[in-house]
Image (tube, rainbow, N blue to C red):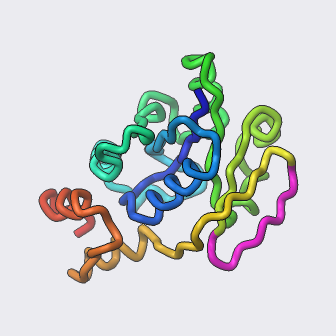
Amino acid sequence: MKVGLFFGSFNPIHIGHLIIANTIYDRSELDEVWFVVSPQNPLKKRKSLIHEFDRLKMVELAIGDNFHFRASDVEFHMPRPSYTIDTLTYLSEQYPNHQFSIFLGSDNLNQFKKWKNYEQILEHYQIYVYPRPGEKLTFDHPAFQEVDAPLLDISATFIRESIQNDQSVKYLLPEKVEEYIRDRKLYL
C-alpha cells in the first residue's frame, strides 16, 4: 500500500490542509493519506499549541467519512520533539508492506537540510512538494516530486487570531471543526 504522510501541528486543521491532501492524493498513485498530528515540531515554538488530543480530534472531524484519509497519533507515543526520520523509520518497521512518502510545502525546502538525517529521507522516501505563496522549488533531488496544487495562503495563525478577536472563520475550517473549537472554547 502506498501511503502519503502529511505531518503537521494542525493547530487547527483547515481547508487548506484538506485541499492539499486531496490534490496530492488525486494526482498521485497513493492509496491513502495519513494526517500525522505532531505533538511538538522541533522547529516551531510550543506556546500556541493546544493539547494534541484536541488537534487529533479536529483532524478526525475534518476528514470525516473520506475513507482515503486517516488521522494518526503515532508521534504521541514517541520521544519529543518529533523528528520525521524517526517516525518514518518506526512506521516502516510497523508496516513493512507499506511504501511511505511525505508531503512538504515549498516554504519548508529551505529548512529541509536542517532536518535530522535528511539524507536518509532523500535516499528512502518520495517527497511530494506542493507550492506555497512566494516560494520556488530550489532543492533539486530525484526524491522530490513537484505537485500541481492550488496556491493557498491560509494560515492557522490567522485562524487562531481571528478566533481570539471574535471574528468569523467560516469557510476557513470544516464546519465540524469550527463547532468543536467553539464548543470547547479553544484558542480564546
Q: Measured along the vertical axis of the image, is residue 21 above or below residue 77?
A: below
Q: Per the image, is 137 magenta?
A: yes
Q: Where the N terminus falls, by quadrant?
A: top right
Q: Measured along the vertical axis of the image, is residue 64 above or below residue 32?
A: below
Q: Residue at x 69, y 56 (%)?
A: 129
* Displayed quadrant of residue 186: bottom left
The location of residue 184, given as percent across then percent down, is 15, 57
Q: Where the C terminus falls, by quadrant?
A: bottom left
Q: Is residue 151 left or right of residue 167?
A: right
Q: Per the image, is 59 magenta?
A: no
Asked whether 176 or 43 is in front, the reply is 176
Label tally: 0
Q: Is residue 119 left or right of residue 82?
A: right
The location of residue 177, given as percent across then percent down, is 26, 58
Asked whether 55 or 20 is in front, the reply is 20
Q: Is residue 135 left or right of residue 16?
A: right
Q: Residue at x 86, y 50 (%)?
A: 141
Magenta-drawn segment? 132-141
Q: Residue at x 41, y 35 (%)?
A: 73
Q: Residue at x 54, y 73 (%)?
A: 152
The location of residue 11, given as percent across then percent down, is 39, 58
**Residue at the extreme left of the image, as rendered:** 183
The location of residue 89, given as percent across then percent down, is 65, 26
Q: Main secondary structure of the magenta part?
A: loop
* Displayed quadrant of residue 53: top left
Asked whether 68 or 161 is in front, the reply is 68
